């Protein structure tokens, strides 16, 4: 029987292969409604997923709806599209490279349904070494790879910051959740296996883009949150990144630091994470 309390949200970018490997059994089980947001995958992931999964039809009972975006709008923005369409009280945001089961998901949901506090977000252990049989703990942050939301409360908080293309979206959301007066809880007795770094196949160009946005995001967040000091500010970050791009021992590391420096330079020049067409920026130009 389908759970009527919860919707799963998965953001895909070239992720059909890892979704088939990690989540196909869960997604075809018809245990939960599923919103799968495809971020304009250039490898044809959306078409592959349509063949693989039982898609929701107007007259049918299949559980998966695939939303195909026209361009890559980033993880947080894509997740927000799913959260705005959810009709259930709770939503679980999952990375494509997470392996879990309906039983573990329902165990996490039970913590939310029986929560005695003003909690807005719950998360499982995503590393086996951190899993243990203890009650849910109040925390300041949980991994964005698996976040269970009270939909009404997270809408009150304001969803993910859409100025960010990649990285630390969950950190920003967690900070605002606590500032709004809600709690965040880590449920260590629930385990989802996170196959780190496998959600999207990588290339040198993708790695450069990711590092660019790490550099940009670091500067954006410290400025947004008022955390700048004489020792910690965007200009100093730029200098540190540039230094590492010179002294790092491997070419790969030097390129990553250079990309971070380019991202910091772009921020200082007033560049946003997205260009005028709404596409993720690839350089400071």
Image: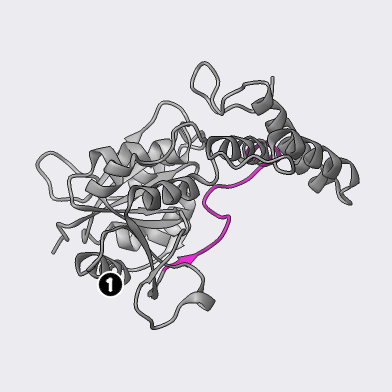
Where on the picture, by quarter, is residue 241? top right
Q: Residue at x 41, y 35 (%)?
A: 77
Residue 283 is covered by the magenta coloring: no
Give left or right: position of 12 versus 255: left
- In percent of width and height, residue 10 lies at 37, 48
Q: Which one is in front, 45 or 171?
A: 171
Q: Can residue 50 be seen in this view?
A: no
Q: Closer to the camera, 284 or 243?
A: 243
Q: Position of residue 255 (x, y in %)?
A: 79, 40
Question: In the rendered picture of this protein, how many numbered marks are placed on residues?
Answer: 1
Tag 1 residue: 107
Please tell me whether mark 1 sits on a helix, a strand or a loop. Answer: helix
The boundaries of the magenta stretch are 192-210
270 and 262: which is toward the camera: 270
* In the rendered image, the vertical position of residue 60 relative to residue 277, given as above or below: below
* Residue 261 in the image: above or below residue 129: above
Q: In which quarter of the image is residue 57?
A: top left
> In the image as oriented, which residue stretches furthest toward the left?
59
Residue 98 appears in the rendering? yes
Residue sitting at x 80%, y 46%: 252
Q: Position of residue 5 (x, y in %)?
A: 17, 57
């Amino acid at each position: 029987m389908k759970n009527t309390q919860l919707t799963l949200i998965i953001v895909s970018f070239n992720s059909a292969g890892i979704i088939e490997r990690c989540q196909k059994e869960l997604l075809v089980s018809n245990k939960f409604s599923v919103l799968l947001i495809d971020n304009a995958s250039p490898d044809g992931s959306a078409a592959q997923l349509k063949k693989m999964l039982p898609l929701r039809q107007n007259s049918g009972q299949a559980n998966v709806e695939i939303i195909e975006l026209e361009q890559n709008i980033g993880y947080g923005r894509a997740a927000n599209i799913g959260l705005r369409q959810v009709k259930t009280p709770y939503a679980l945001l999952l990375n494509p490279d997470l392996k879990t089961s309906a039983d573990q998901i329902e165990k996490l949901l039970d913590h939310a349904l029986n929560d005695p506090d003003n909690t807005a977000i719950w998360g499982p252990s995503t590393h086996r070494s951190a899993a243990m049989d203890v009650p849910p703990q109040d925390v300041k942050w949980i991994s964005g790879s698996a976040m269970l939301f009270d939909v009404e409360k997270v809408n009150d908080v304001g969803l993910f910051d859409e100025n960010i293309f990649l990285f630390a979206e969950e950190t920003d959301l967690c900070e605002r959740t606590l500032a709004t007066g809600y709690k965040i809880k880590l449920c260590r007795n629930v385990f989802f296996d996170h196959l780190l770094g496998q959600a999207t196949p990588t290339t040198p160009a993708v790695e450069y883009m990711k590092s660019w946005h790490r550099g940009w995001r670091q500067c954006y967040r410290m400025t947004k949150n008022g955390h700048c000091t004489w020792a910690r500010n965007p200009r100093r970050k730029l200098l540190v990144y540039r230094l590492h791009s010179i002294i790092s021992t491997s070419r790969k590391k030097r390129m990553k630091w250079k990309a971070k420096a380019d991202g910091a330079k772009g921020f200082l020049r007033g560049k946003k994470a997205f260009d005028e067409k709404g596409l993720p920026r690839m350089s400071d130009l």
